[in-house]
Image (cartoon, helix red, strand yellow):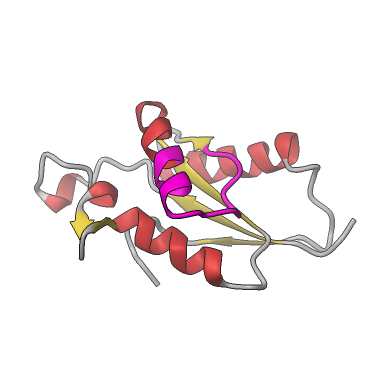
Amino acid sequence: MEKRIVAIVPAAGLGKRFGSSAKKTFVALDGMPLLAHTLKRLNREPLITDIIPVLRDQDTKTGLDIAEEHKLDKVRWIAAGGPERQDSIYNGLRLLEEMGGGVSPDTLILVHDGARPV
């Protein structure tokens, strides 16, 4: 199995402290959802092989639309968010195991919050 670097991007939170009816990750910044900024930056990183956003079930279509609109070819799947952040990250890892052909000892996993563009 080849060396992979996978970015899991938790973005299923409600953003309660944000104080808006809109979800923080979908608020527009410079004409684009905050999550799109984060995913685009990760997609441009040549060492990253896969990106797994983790979204609430009702936001999956929006996430897929963002990936398609911005030509994010490293986003192939979207994991379901869990009750807590650690559950969401675990769901991302499980999806990688199920859909992504498994995880080898050479696989590196990074976790980067969807509401914090890099």
In this rendering, would 56 be left or right of 31?
A: right
- Image quadrant for the N terminus? bottom right
Q: Position of residue 5 (x, y in %)?
A: 69, 64
The answer to which quarter of the image holds residue 109 is bottom right
Q: Position of residue 87 (x, y in %)?
A: 50, 39
- On screen, residue 30 above or below 62: below
- Residue in view at x 20 percent, y 55 percent: 28
- Image quadrant for the C terminus? bottom left
- Residue in view at x 27 percent, y 57 percent: 32
Label count reads 0
Magenta-drawn stretch contains 22? no
Residue segment shown in magenta:
64-78
Q: Position of residue 11 (x, y in %)?
A: 38, 47
In this rendering, would 92 be left or right of 10?
A: right
Near-viewer residue (39 or 106): 39
Near-viewer residue (44 or 5): 44
- Residue in view at x 41 percent, y 27 percent: 57
Most common secondary structure along the magenta stretch: loop
